[in-house]
Image (spheres, rainbow, N blue to C red):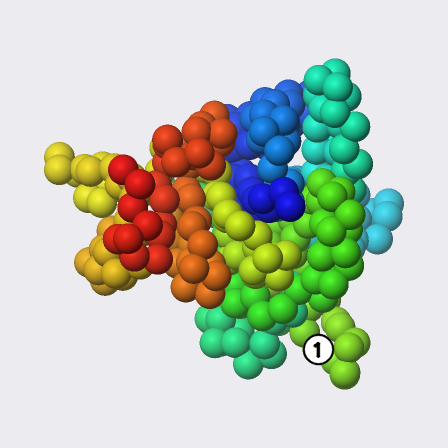
Amino acid sequence: MKKKVVIALGGNAILQPGQKGTYEEQIDNIEVACREIAELVKKGFQIVITHGNGPQVGNILIQNEEGAKRVPKMPLDVCGAQSQGMIGYMIQQKLRKILIRNGYNNEITTIITQVVVDKNDPSFQNPSKPVGPFYSEEKAKIEIAKGESWIEDAGRGWRKVVPSPEPKTIVEANIIKKVVQDEVIVIASGGGGIPVVEEGKDIYLGIDAVIDKDLAGQRLAVDIEADIFVILTDVSGVAINYKKDNETWLRNITLDEVNLYEDEGHFRQGSMGPKVRACKRFVEITNKPAIISSLDKLVDAVEGKAGTRIIPDASEKTS
Ligand code: ADP
Ligand code: MG
């Protein structure tokens, strides 16, 4: 059986810092990511892709806001679904083109994915994840009066903040599993999935929240019984003393070592923190490795030659 790899694409795989988010920019970035992924397909791995959606959903929110005089605004969960469709479609097209040119005929599909969160998740008491653009204080005050949470961000303006609850289960887990069994390349749980709460048994309601894409990717990896979970980002891996004089990049680290470094505060919340946490959970549950690497080193990372590999214990150390 083919080895299954879940790949979580970071924001930079779709949009680079300083870019506006034109169609051309995004499709060009996606092409680069898909070339890397195609190399893994050629090596015989079976691929499941998940991805971030921050800038894309931000732009969809602006379109909604600016267009509100002409067409009705859509809620955040619907904007999230739109972004999954949009990004998934671009990946489907580019990856297919590259594979076909290389003589591979893999089928590819995107699954609009809902992720269940707990209504009592503590993050609902403390919305902290900014979404969308900066606005004036007047606009923020109007929305706050309607019940939303907004924060003033270091003099740059006001931004809406939403809760970032823990992912519990993936509603479409079964169907994703079935499609993966058929050896289809699947794009799922984009942007951390559309956050939903249980309204009744097996009935779900979309909510105003954002789930961390790395933590949701970990659920996906466990659900599809992945052999490897890879998080691709804009740095070569995980460092301790990051950006300090004694910065050290890690190659193979055991769960015990990760826990120690985590307690020492080496991994920043909102960036490396959730990635390390997601990898840890995957390794704890499956006893299989998880990797954090840069996008351009995907193949080397999977082969143990690049990135930071989190492993259950020292007996698994390869280098
Ligand atoms: P993504 O869009 O891929 O999720 P993030 O910006 O959320 O990217 O996370 C990657 C960033 O994490 C890196 O650009 C780096 O600046 C930051 N980071 C924080 N702590 C560390 C660390 N200990 N080692 C490496 N990178 C770190
Ligand atoms: Mg991130």
Neighbourhood count class around disc 1 (C-alpha, 10 Å): few under 14, some 14–19, many 20 upward: some
Q: Is residue 206 above or below residue 96?
A: below
Q: Residue furthest left?
A: 246
Instruction: Name the image quarter holding residue 239.
Output: top left
Instruction: Name the image quarter holding residue 170.
Output: bottom right
Instruction: Name the image quarter holding residue 88.
Output: top right
The residue sitting at 59% across, 76% down in the picture is: 118
Q: Is residue 224 above or below residue 242?
A: below
Q: On the rendered structure, is 205 left or right of 123?
A: right
The residue lying toward the viewer, choosing from 312 and 186, is 312
- The quadrant the C terminus occupies is top left
The residue sitting at 79% across, 28% down in the picture is: 105
Examine the rendering and report whether any part of residue 128 can be seen: no
Q: Is residue 318 above or below residue 150?
A: above
Examine the rendering and report whether any part of residue 290 can be seen: yes
The residue lying toward the viewer, choosing from 270 and 187, is 187
Q: Residue furthest right?
A: 70
Q: Which residue is mark 1?
A: 198
Where does residue 310 sit, x and y in percent of width and height? Answer: 36, 50
Q: On the rendered structure, is 306 left or right of 32?
A: left
